[in-house]
Image (cartoon, rainbow, N blue to C red):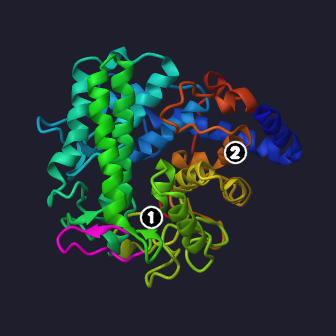
Amino acid sequence: MAERELKAFLEGLSPERRQRLTQRVTQIVGHIKKKGLIDYQGKPRLTGYAYGVLYDWDLYFENLFLSYLGVSQYCKNGVEIFLDQQLPCGFIARALDPEEGPQYPRDHFKPFLAQIALLGGRMEKDYSWLRGNYYERLTSYVDYWQRYTDLDHNGLSCRDSAGHTGMDNQYARAGREGAFCCEGVDLNCYILRELEAMEQLADELGLPGDGAKFHARVEKLRADIQSTLWSEEDGFYFDRNERTGARIPALSAAGFIPLWLGIPDEKQAEALITRHLTNPDEFWRPYPVASWAATNPDYRQKQIQELDQGCCNWLGTTWAPVNYMIFQGLRRYGYDALAKELAEKTFTMCLDLNPVTREYYNAETGEGIGLNPFFGWSSLGLFLLLEYYLGYDASDLTRQDVLPLASRYLGIDYEAVPAMDLGEVVRYG
């Protein structure tokens, strides 16, 4: 039934729109082959950035896109490349420059490595490469988050700065470099998913004792997020200032990430969605989801280099990977009509309003911002509707089969796509 619905959706697209979708996905693959795959110490590495740097959570979403084409090898390569940089304490810097080496030496790799390893293992049906050394390193990497960044021992980890959140200039919630006091909602959700991925990996490797320990840690962290970061009065998940114990009142799209993991109960989910997510005065702008509520005093769409210090703007713009997580969360709680609406708006924004894929988007107009052209995680915006009609979730950690949607339903053969020149890459244009 679901496959028929997907095929009906694709057949219902106008010929021009169907061709545009196929050409865009093909273009992204061609750009990846030209600039996104560069040999690093004998291993081809994957990045969505033409300037060549590998970033932590980007790597997960970039590999989700390649899973639509049945390409798995860069999961293993990416995990190994970063684990090979690991310090004895378990720390791994969150970015890697092919010429200069590890970047941001204060910032531990965001909690996505185990999820990347699991995604690759699901596609290849092989986890043997993790046995021994790499599994132990993954364990040490995940342990670092809870061992060294939970400074007040309340069960929640904190991060160094807004840049460390990945939402680069949300300074009101996470401070500038060196703050190290934000117990992030999103951070602790990502740690929880890493623990879930480690539980799955332990089971695949025949280590049920480890799996049971990771499961116990999952349940404890889930309870800690609920008891500490949820505000019943506001109907929202807020970050917490570890130094003062106070909730940080800024409304960020990070507050919706618990939906992706199924953390809220039904009443909490309803409050999150009806009071905040679909509120047009906050996050549900013409092209949602705004990364920063429009009620925040510093909400804006424009990139201001002297204020943002060269980083990307997360003070209200729309980002495809955030939409992806929220979309899956809406489906998880049965808000199918709203999930479809979000998928349709994202699809229109990414495919129809912009001639090339962009790094992020203006939530008021849908206009692309940042890297131009871009071949990284924004590619997910083209696939939300396909996942919706198929009833599929590529990010489901428990799913054993990973489907090549682009190959199977768009007829795109990854191996047959030639490398394509990007032309001039504009950073802020």
What amino acid is at disc 2?
A: Tyr
Task: Depth check: give the residue in front, 193 or 294.
Answer: 193
Identity of the residue drawn at 40% across and 62% down: 167
In-image side of 396 versus 340 (left or right): left
Residue 372 drawn above or below residue 15 = below
Secondary structure that dominates the magenta span:
loop
Number of residues whose C-alpha sits closer than 10 Å to that of mark 2, classed few (under 14), some (14–19) or many (20 or more): many
Please provide percent x and percent y for residue 56.
36, 45
Q: From the viewer's perspective, is 168 left or right of 325?
A: left
Callout 1 amino acid: Gly
Residue in view at x 24 percent, y 32 percent: 139
**Lower position in the chain sequence, tag 2 or tag 1:** 1
Is residue 44 visible to the viewer in this orientation of the structure? no
Location of residue 157 (image quadrant): bottom left
Residue extent of the magenta highlight: 238-250
Q: Quadrant of the N terminus?
A: top right
x%, y% of residue 238?
Answer: 38, 69
* Residue named by callout 1: 255
